[in-house]
Image (cartoon, rainbow, N blue to C red):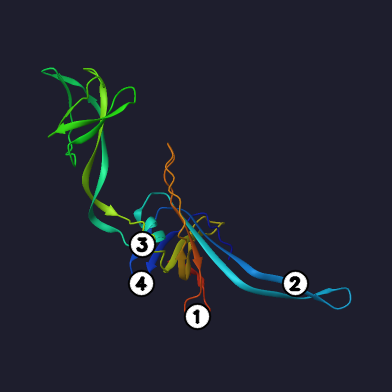
Amino acid sequence: MKLLVIDTADAVMRRKSDGHIFITAEAQLTSISQSLGINEKIYGGIGNKPLAIMKGQKEVTSSLRNAFYDQEFLSLTQGVEINKDKSATVYKTEKSLKVVDNAGSLEVTITGVPLDDTVYVRNAKGEVESATAATKTVTIPTGHAVEGEIVSVTYQETITGDIVELDGEKFAEAFTLEYHTIAYDPDTNKVVKDIYIQLDHVVPSDEFELALENGTPIAPEVSFECMASPNSTSIGRIIEVDRV
């Protein structure tokens, strides 16, 4: 029957090495494409007539772009697991700190705990100088700022978070990939079918781009090379099911 498909698809990925499942229901784009590496006509005889077509090297690829940033997408491309609740050292910047005069000493108060007593103060002109922090009080370097000026202070601190390691010796692993979308009857606009696309052996591309642009949300996109599983000729399948 005629079907109208206008939605993207939900995706479920399973890492083959350990069975880890990644599910997304916020995809902006899901696609599958097929090309042939060999697709040539064979010519012969008088007039060099077309006699046959030589076909081979079927290539299937898929792309998945998500609406939201998710560390799972990064771990897919890196061949690593997400390290939960691990410690790291980062630079933290506290802004909108007002310089006050404390008995002739110009100071600001920060809320965090620096890793050491050296911090960096950026004044209203954009100039940066190192300063000393005692507990949570930062002494402004002489001549760097005046009383009442708004400055920022940057320092290193230890945090705990979820880490995706960019390991130069690890690469993307193999997954199974399943897309699920719905189809409408164009005459009634009622959902009448569920459509599943299953790919049995996909390897994410190790190439990725993480672009941070003002006013533009990060939309991670991963490309997959789709291959036949070991001891099989099947790359995948498309299943159409009546909606109950």
Which quarter of the picture shows residue 120? top left
Which circle marks residue 244 in the picture?
none
The residue where tag 3 is placed is 22
Using the numbered discs, state the Cα–Cα distance from disc 1 to disc 4 in whole angstroms: 18 Å
Left or right placement of residue 201 versus residue 103 in this view: right
Residue density around tag 1, few if under 14, some if 14–19, many if 20 or more, within 10 Å = few
Q: Secondary structure at mark 2?
A: strand
Q: Residue at x 34, y 26 (%)?
A: 126
Give the mark toward the camera: 3 or 2.
Answer: 2
Residue 97 x %, y % = 23, 26
User: Distance from label 2 to label 1 (Cα)?
Assistant: 28 Å
Q: Residue 232: which numbered mark, if any?
A: 1
Mark 4 or mark 2: whose residue is earlier in sequence: 4
Alpha-carbon distance for marks 3 and 1?
Answer: 25 Å
Q: Is residue 243 visible?
A: no
Name the mark on residue 17. Answer: 4
Q: Does 241 appear above or below 145?
A: below
Residue 232 in the image: above or below residue 59: below
Examine the image and state in which quarter residue 132 appears. Answer: top left
Residue 205: image location, x then y, percent = 47, 61
Q: Nearer the viewer, residue 19 or 140?
A: 140
For the residues labelled 4 and 3, the Cα–Cα distance comes to 13 Å
Query: For the residue labelled by badge 4, is the local secondary structure a helix, a strand or a loop?
Result: loop
- 167 left or right of 156? right
Which of marks 1 and 2 precedes in the sequence? 2
Q: Which residue is mark 2?
A: 41
The answer to the question of whether label 2 and label 1 lie on touching residues, with beta carbons closer than 8 A, is: no
- Which residue is at the far right? 46
